[in-house]
């Protein structure tokens, strides 16, 4: 249907808008003039030729022997002209020398006037349209364009779409998810690529699990001799040495506890629930306020969203614990959005240098240059926050506060299908 209607439309547009030099029509004109010349006396032939010249026709008389000097192609003819001549030959009886006759590099149509004389017609392009070309060429052209279009659509759909699907799956991949990440369907190459990526994911997951088991085992094995060391230290008589040793033992115990909490990664397996995020933040702020820290909450009294409640509680607690160590005042803000919610923990502490705001999310990294307190922690709090944000397909970032301090922003998208956020302003 596309070829039929498209070809018919193009043919009609060309016929209506352009004066097409048709080869068969030109041959009919030459044949008509040759007939007039053959029936006219010799004295009147010049009059007929002069009238033809006035009409814009480049015609002349020549001996019939000139046909032997005709060639079948000009000295310079393009591929397109040859293709048209070959694919779309003219209809009707050919003139003298054939349809593809050239004299001195110019295309010519010749018709016999009498036994000794013939009429030569010049003055039309070398590449000239024919009736066959006008009736069929546009349909061929439309068919080629349609096939090319379908080919590109097919190529885009069969090549780029699977790649986009694999790319999206790779971005959303969770190393803790044991299910198949990349769907193994499509062409042979796409299926092989998906199978290879799934195999790589499984190997990485196995390696991570082995590392986690090893570290957990080491942490638990260290606790036993550490407990014996604590008991023996408490029996020491030298109070000063005993206190220093117990402080070191407590420091090691805290490091083991924080490492185990980091490796526990319950946030990756916790179920998504519909919870009141505002209530979670208010509870965390109240817990810190109860032990004497200046911390306040600003935001809606109620904000319902789909998330992992225990993980969000842990992330906000880590941000607040990190802030109260180095700041006098901490403000927790909650902002509800159509696509999720944003939590900001704002403090008036010394802040973090711009060059280190990405590295602080790495495990066991401590900003000792900016945080002079040697008991500031083990560098796992922000790493856990970043992991919790990633498990929610969210982001976390640290920004400079204009009046001094730091802004820790946790942006969490709504994990439910469709909008489900509701909030009530204070």
Image (cartoon, rainbow, N blue to C red):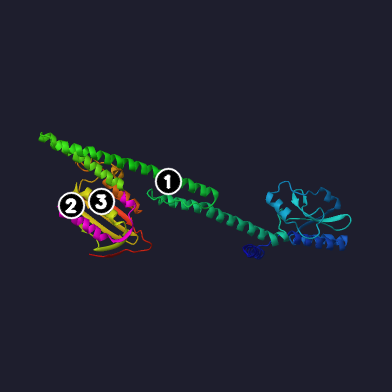
Q: Earlier in the sequence, mark 2 or mark 3?
A: 2
Q: Earlier in the sequence, mark 1 or mark 3?
A: 1
Q: Position of residue 228 (x, y in %)?
A: 20, 37
Residue 329's label in the rendered image is 2
Q: Position of residue 76 (x, y in %)?
A: 71, 47
Q: Which residue is mark 1?
A: 202
User: What range is drawn magenta here?
Assistant: 265-294
Question: Alpha carbon of mark 2 to alpha carbon of mark 3: how far?
Answer: 12 Å
Circle 3: is it few (<14), some (14-19), or many (20+) Cα within 10 Å? many
Rendered image quadrant of residue 90: bottom right
Q: Position of residue 196 (x, y in %)?
A: 48, 45
The answer to whether residue 401 is visible is no
* Residue at figure coordinates x 15%, y 55% from the top left: 290
Quadrant position of the N terminus in the picture = bottom right
In the structure shown, which secondary structural element does the residue marked by tag 1 occupy?
Answer: helix
Circle 1: is it few (<14), some (14-19), or many (20+) Cα within 10 Å? some
**Between 338 and 252, the one nearer to me in the picture:** 252
Q: Position of residue 102 (x, y in %)?
A: 77, 50
Q: Are marks 1 and 3 in contact (CB under 8 Å)?
A: no
Rendered image quadrant of residue 48: bottom right
Q: Which residue is mark 3?
A: 407
Does 250 sit above or below residue 280? above
* Residue at figure coordinates x 22%, y 39% from the top left: 252
The answer to whether residue 169 is visible is yes
* Residue at figure coordinates x 67%, y 64% from the top left: 15
Judged by depth in the image, the label closer to the viewer, 1 or 3, is 1
Total residue callouts: 3
In the structure shown, which secondary structural element does the residue marked by tag 3 occupy?
Answer: strand
């Amino acid at each position: 249907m596309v070829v039929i209607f498209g070809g018919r439309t193009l043919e009609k547009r060309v016929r209506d808008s352009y004066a097409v030099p048709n080869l068969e029509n030109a041959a009919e004109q030459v044949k008509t003039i040759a007939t007039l010349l053959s029936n006219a006396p010799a004295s009147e032939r010049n009059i007929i030729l002069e009238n033809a010249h006035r009409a814009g026709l480049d015609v002349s008389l020549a001996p019939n022997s000139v046909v032997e000097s005709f060639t079948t192609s000009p000295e310079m003819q393009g591929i397109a002209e040859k293709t048209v001549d070959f694919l779309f030959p003219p209809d009707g009886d050919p003139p003298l020398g054939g349809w593809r006759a050239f004299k001195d590099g110019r295309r010519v149509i010749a018709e016999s006037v009498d036994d000794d004389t013939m009429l030569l017609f010049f003055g039309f392009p070398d590449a000239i349209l024919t009736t066959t070309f006008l009736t069929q060429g546009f349909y061929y052209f439309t068919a080629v364009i349609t096939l090319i279009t379908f080919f590109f659509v097919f190529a885009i759909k069969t090549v780029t779409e699977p790649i986009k699907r694999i790319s999206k799956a790779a971005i959303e991949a969770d190393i803790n998810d044991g299910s198949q990440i990349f769907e193994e369907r499509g062409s042979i190459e796409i299926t092989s690529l998906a199978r290879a990526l799934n195999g790589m994911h499984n190997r990485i997951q196995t390696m991570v699990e082995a590392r986690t088991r090893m570290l957990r085992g080491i942490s638990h094995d260290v606790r036993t001799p550490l407990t014996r060391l604590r008991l023996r230290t408490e029996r020491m008589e030298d109070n000063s040495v005993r206190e220093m040793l117990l402080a070191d033992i407590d420091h090691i115990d805290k490091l083991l506890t924080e490492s185990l909490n980091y490796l526990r990664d319950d946030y990756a397996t916790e179920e998504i629930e519909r919870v009141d995020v505002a209530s979670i933040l208010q509870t965390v702020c109240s817990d810190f306020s109860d032990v004497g820290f200046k911390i306040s909450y600003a935001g809606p009294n109620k904000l319902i969203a789909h998330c992992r409640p225990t993980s969000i509680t842990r992330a906000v607690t880590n941000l607040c614990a990190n802030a109260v160590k180095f700041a006098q005042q901490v403000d927790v803000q909650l902002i509800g959005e159509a696509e999720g919610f944003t939590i900001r923990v704002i403090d008036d502490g010394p802040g973090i240098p711009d060059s280190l705001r990405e590295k602080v999310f790495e495990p066991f990294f401590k900003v000792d240059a900016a945080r002079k307190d040697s008991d500031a922690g083990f560098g796992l709090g922000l790493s856990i926050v970043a992991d919790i944000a990633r498990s929610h397909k969210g982001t976390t970032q640290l920004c400079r506060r204009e009046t001094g301090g730091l802004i820790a922003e946790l942006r969490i998208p709504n994990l439910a299908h469709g909008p489900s956020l509701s909030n009530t302003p204070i």
